[in-house]
Image: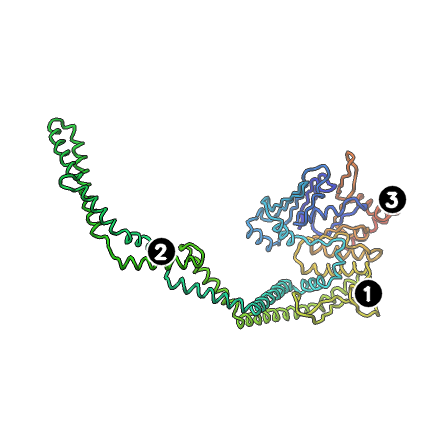
Amino acid sequence: MLLSLTLADFVLVDSLSLEFASGFSVFTGETGAGKSILVDALTLVLGGRADAGMVREGAVRAEVAAEFDLHDQAALGRWLAENELTGDADALLLRRTLDDGGRSRAYVNGRPVTVQQLRQAGEMLVDIHGQHAHYSLLKPAEQRRLLDTYAGSDALAHSVAQAWQGWRQARDRHDSAARNSGETDIERERLTSTVREIEALNFSVEGWRTLQDEHRRLAHAAELIQGAQAAALEIEDDDAGITARLKATRTRLHDLVEIDPALSAMLESVTAATDALRESAHELARYADRVDLDAERLDEAERRLAAVQGLARKHRLPPEDLADCLDAARARLAELGEGSDLQSLAAAETEAWAAYETQARQLGSARRAAADRLADSVAEGIHRLAMRGGRFEVAFTPCEPGVGGLESVEFMVSPNAGQGLKPLAGTASGGELSRIGLALQTVLADVQGAATLIFDEVDAGIGGAVAEVVGRLLADLGRQRQVLCVTHLPQVAACASGHYRVSKEQIGGRACTRVEHLRDQARVDELARMLGGVKITAATRAHAAEMLHQAAEVR
């Protein structure tokens, strides 16, 4: 339920804060006063389209905030928790800002969100029926949607639409594979050859690096042996080796230490260096003994190097990328295997069609089961709305399978007794269409989940005694849901438990919209204005007071 609405610099509103109660409330006022601005503001804060023209002239930013009571809103509570947007236990705050450049920001419980998230929350909170909502009833798709909603089959209808798309995709894959089977065979043959060639090499990146290191050693084996032996000889040669010269140095230092013990550290360093060099000479000798002068192994390594480099050149890539090339070829072959098996694709298409057909028939059965109940309820509603003797039915016609199922849905109406049923689009006048639409909306209010319903002049084209019935219908609806209605009809306004007057005044040369919550005499005066126009007399005030009294008795 909507608890409050706050506006700042929105269209003609400079600053406005309203609080709402449960039940049925109306907004009235002169034409052009800005009644629908409040509906526009709610639409914006519920995730509707933003337009820079909504920012009040001269302001840099507009802001709309709406607070809702979350009592009995378990689904919305779960959604908030899943999106980490939970706030107070029983309250929800939605906020939308819009700058004069058209850029908007959205918030849920003070946290930034996307407009899509704001819209998702709004759809669970409020249903808005605009001034031209009735005319959407003339569209077959809208008639089908309303029946599915009444039947509680929205989820099934969505599944049918998805199954239809799934079947079309399966059919397209099958058709495409059949058309391209020749090209696919050529590609498969090429990829198979690539896989076989690379697999025959038993190639791996690590093995390639090891092979390069081994070839380098084998190719330079003689040079390595000679170099290691020469280095060892330079260190350990008896007469000219480094260790021989260090030995003489160590003897000299030993004698000097006898004179000055401070040279002991130097003697130890030279001794350690001599030992380290001898160990290095021994390691070089052992390395030279281990180096393999294996010409056959060198030839084998060179052949493998040439094979790898040749295959890499063939595929125009570095040798290191051959492993990735193999993986890509295998993956593509797997795709071609899945996508080119015409028999499997045909089976998948058949399976997808069967799934669609099964769900579509289930949906058709649910629609037919609900159609009579909907027709009876709507007929009862239009009888109350001065269309006595009128009939309403839902007609089904088999059609080409599609996203909406296996049958077309069409609302049929007979506005007057003795007339045959005809399609709604070609039968109802504007006033009749408004009454049928209102009857449908009140019937659907029992099955739709939003706790707040907003009607923006949906009683257009209705007057006289029928207007009073409309007011009572909306009041009845207000016992189940919170109902807010923009209206020009005093008969409707009299039936409301809450009444807000919207007016426009000039402040500093600028038009400003004001909203006042009316009570007692102020409400009588507003109804009198709606009844009598410019000149309000004692008689019109008395009539207005009588209307309120009678409506209170009915409530």
Label 2 vs label 1: CA separation?
87 Å
Q: Is residue 145 left or right of residue 291?
A: right
* Dot label at residue 208: 2
**Residue 118: x %, y % from top left:** 62, 49
Q: Earlier in the sequence, mark 2 or mark 1?
A: 2
Label 2 vs label 3: CA separation?
97 Å
Q: Is residue 222 shown above or below 200?
A: above
Q: Secondary structure at mark 1?
A: loop
- Label 2 or label 3, whichever lies nearer to me, is 2
Q: Is residue 155 shown above or below 504?
A: below
Identify the residue position indicated by label 1 in the image.
415
Task: State which quarter of the image contains the C terminus.
Answer: bottom right
Label 1 vs label 3: CA separation?
36 Å
* Dot label at residue 156: none
Badge 2 amino acid: Trp
Badge 2: residue crowd in 10 Å (few <14, some 14–19, many ≥20):
some
Badge 3: residue crowd in 10 Å (few <14, some 14–19, many ≥20):
few
